[in-house]
Image (cartoon, rainbow, N blue to C red):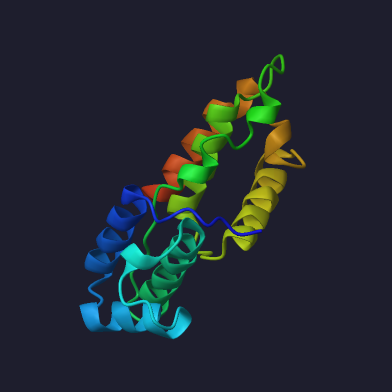
Amino acid sequence: MQNMATITSSQIKIIHTIVKKIGMPDAEYRLIIERVWPGKKSCKELTEFEAERLIKAIQEVGYNKYKVKTKYYNPYNKKKHNDLAGREEMASPAQLRMIEGMWADVSYVTDEIKREQALRKFVEKKFHISALRFLPARMVERVVKTLQAMKFGRKREAA
């Protein structure tokens, strides 16, 4: 069931920031809204759920048409991995979210599900761990250094 709450102020800011960053004309942005949600002319008329869909749509257009990769803060992921809290000698939920955020910065995959699959393959191939959720706390620094090296184009691996 979709969320019927009205769009949040942070979602409005995210939408306008992405539109400005990719250089999308205002008319094109409003045309996307009208085509997907007939009768609505502004993002302020959308629900929270519709706003999330709009954000993903303009990011996709930005990447495909304007060749600009954008990311945004997803308020729904604040609690991601919290069910894994309190495990001895394992990465904390905050560390797992940080690694996922860093992966989003270096990954070329725009689809969220495929990006998670790519991260899983990366962790398995590079660190011999079947999934991020099984990452030991002692390996967090190695993963972070490797992702930093990828981001800044260093050829040297952080091992």
User: Which of the 4 quarters of the picture holds residue 127?
Assistant: top right
Compared with 71, 141 (above or below) is above
Q: Position of residue 141 (x, y in %)?
A: 52, 27
Foreground residue among 119 and 155: 119
Residue 92 is situated, as x and y percent measured from the top left of the image, at 60, 24
Q: Quadrant of the N terminus?
A: bottom right
Establish if 114 lies above or below 62: above
Number of on-image labels = 0
Q: Name the residue: 43% across, 83% down.
A: 38
Report which quarter residue 68 is drawn in: bottom left
User: What x and y, as percent, mark residue 122?
Assistant: 64, 50
Q: Residue at x 47, y 35 (%)?
A: 145
User: In terms of image quadrants, where is residue 32?
Assistant: bottom left
Q: Nearer the viewer, residue 77 or 44?
A: 44
- What residue lies at 51% left-to-right and 36% top-to-bottom? 78
Is residue 159 in view from this perspective? no
Q: Nearer the viewer, residue 46 or 13?
A: 46
Name the quarter where the C terminus is drawn.
Answer: top right
Identify the residue at horizontal 56%, vertical 65% (top origin).
Answer: 111
**Residue 39 in the image: x percent, y percent?**
39, 82
Q: Is residue 20 above or below residue 66?
A: above
Left or right for 83, reference 5:
right
